[in-house]
Amino acid sequence: MTRKGRTGGTAPSRRDRAPLTRDSIVAAALALIDADGLAKFSMRRLGAALGVDPMAVYRHVEDQEALFDAVAEAIFDELQVATLPWEGTWREVSQEYCRRLRDALLRHPNAVTVFATRPIRSRTSIDAGVKMIDKLREAGFPPGRGLQIVRCLREYTLGHALSVAVLRLGAADRSRKPRAGDPGYNVLAEAADATEADDHFELGLAAMVNGFPPEEAAG
Amino acid sequence: MTRKGRTGGTAPSRRDRAPLTRDSIVAAALALIDADGLAKFSMRRLGAALGVDPMAVYRHVEDQEALFDAVAEAIFDELQVATLPWEGTWREVSQEYCRRLRDALLRHPNAVTVFATRPIRSRTSIDAGVKMIDKLREAGFPPGRGLQIVRCLREYTLGHALSVAVLRLGAADRSRKPRAGDPGYNVLAEAADATEADDHFELGLAAMVNGFPPEEAAG
DNA sequence: CGCCTGTGGTCTACAGTGTAGACAACGGTT
DNA sequence: AACCGTTGTCTACACTGTAGACCACAGGCG
C-alpha cells in the first residue's frame, strides 16, 4: 500500500493517470468554473476534479492568481485571432474582433469576472493588439490613435459581456420580484426585463466604430 | 468586568462608541477597501476597524455579499444624479453621466471590481436610468431604444473604469519589465506604456454618443 | 545490479476566512 | 421592579490557500 491503502482501490494511483500538465490543469479549472461557478471554485475542488492531491497543482502553477491568469488567457485564445477577416476594412476587422471576444466571454459567463479583473499579457493577446493597430495605421490612423481606438472597443465589449454575465447569473437567485410599484417606473422596468439584456451590443458597437472621426490625410 | 476584562481597559466599551449603523458600516468597508485593497478586506478586519466584534456587523447587514451590494450603491450615489445638466441635450446629459460614473469609480480603484460584479438596483440607480430614458424619449427615441443606448454607454464606461483600475493596480507589482524584444513590437508596447492608460475615454465616449443613428420623425 | 538525484504527487499543518448559534449587556416599556 | 427586544460578544465549525517535509518513481551512473 502507498501509505493510504490506495493501491488496488478504485482511485487511480498515479501510474494509471495521464500526468498532470499546466494545460490540463487550466482546462480543468475553466471547466469547473463553468460548471459550478466561481464562488464554489477552490484549489481543493480542482484537485478532486483532477483526481489528484490539491497540492499537486502547485508543481505546475505558482498559485491561484497565476492559475486565473492562465484561465483568462485560455479564454482569449478562443478568439482565434488568426482567422479574423484581416483583408477587410478596419471596421470589419474591429467589429468581428469584438463579436468574437463577446462570444468567447459569454461562453463562460462564470469566468467573465476572472477575465475582467486582470490584464491579459499573453502572446496571442499582444499579437492581436499589434495587428489591429497595424490595420488601423493602414487606414490612416497613427499608432497612438489606433491604440486608443482598440482600447475603446475592447472596453466596451468587456463591459458589455461583464454586465450581461452578471445580470444573467444574478437573475437566477435574486430579484425575481414582479414589483407592482409606481406604474410609470413599471413600464420601463418591465420593458427592461422583457428586452433581451444583450440585444443592444451591435447597436453600440456600430455606433462606436462609425463614430470615430476619420483621419483625413494622415502621414 | 464584561467577561473579557474589557471594562475600564483601553478598548471602548459599547457605551462610549457611537452605535453601529448600516451606513457607518458601509462607509467603513469602503474606506477599508480603498486603503488596503479588496484582497485584504475581511469581515474580521472590518470589525477591528469599527472597534467592534466582527459578528456585530451581521446585525445590520445580512452577509458579505449584501455588504458589497451596499458598497456598490454607495459608490453610485457619489454621482449626484440630481445635479446632472438635465436641461441640456441628451448628448450632454449622457456624456456628463458617464464622466461622473467614471470619476466615481476611479476614485475607488480597489472597489471597482466590487461595483462591476453585481447589478446595481438601488433607488437612485433606477431613478437615474428612468430619467435618462425619459430624456431620450424627448429627443425622439422610443423607450426600448433609449434603454439600449443607456446600456451601451454604461457598459463602455464600466469597462473603461474597470480596465484602467485593473491596469493601475496591476502595474504596481507586475510587468515592470522593459522587454527589449522584437523592435517592432517594442515601439507599440512602449507607446502603450507611455500613453496614459485612460486618455482615450473621451474619444470613445464621443464616438459612441455621436454614432447612434438619429431617430427621425419619431412618435 | 545497486545507488543517486531530480521531478512530481502526497500529507500535514497553519493561519485565516465567513458565519451559525448561544449568550449577555443594555435601553425602553409597562 | 419585571420584562423584552435590540445589539454586541463569544465560541465553534467547516472551509480556504499554501508552506514545508516526505515519499514514489524514472532515469543516469558506477
Image (cartoon, coloured by chain):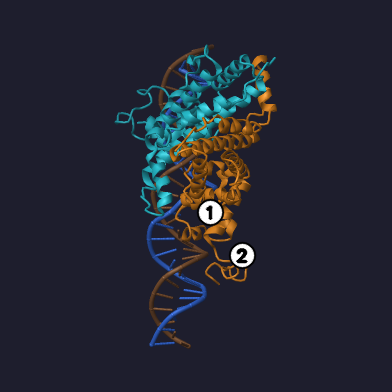
Chain colours: A orange, B cyan, C brown, D blue
Instruction: Specify the label residue A11 is tagged with.
Output: 2
Q: Is residue B140 visible?
A: yes
| Amino acid type assigned to the residue bearing label 2 in the image | Ala
- Expressed as whole percent of the image width and height from the top left, the position of residue A141 reads 48, 37
Q: Secondary structure at mark 1?
A: helix
| Amino acid type assigned to the residue bearing label 1 in the image | Arg
From this view, report whether residue B173 is shown above or below residue A188: below
**Quarter of image, res A95:** top right
- Few, some or many residues within 10 Å of mark 2 (<14, 14–19, 20+): few
Residue occupying image coordinates x 53% and y 62%:
A21
- Few, some or many residues within 10 Å of mark 1 (<14, 14–19, 20+): some
Specify the quadrant that holds the N terminus of chain B. top left
All told, the count of numbered labels is 2
Q: Is residue B42 visible?
A: no
Q: Secondary structure at mark 2?
A: loop
Specify the quadrant that holds the C terminus of chain B. top right
User: Decide: marks 2, 1 in contact (CB < 8 A)?
Assistant: no
- Expressed as whole percent of the image width and height from the top left, the position of residue D21 reads 39, 65
- Along the viewing direction, whichever of A117 and A13 lies nearer the viewer: A117
- Expressed as whole percent of the image width and height from the top left, the position of residue B201 reads 47, 31
- Expressed as whole percent of the image width and height from the top left, the position of residue A135 reads 52, 43
The chain containing the residue under callout 2 comes to: A
Q: Mark 2 and mark 1: span between their CA atoms?
A: 16 Å
Residue occupying image coordinates x 40% and y 49%:
B186
Which residue has dot 1 on it? A44
Q: Are marks 2 and 1 on the same chain?
A: yes
The chain containing the residue under callout 1 comes to: A
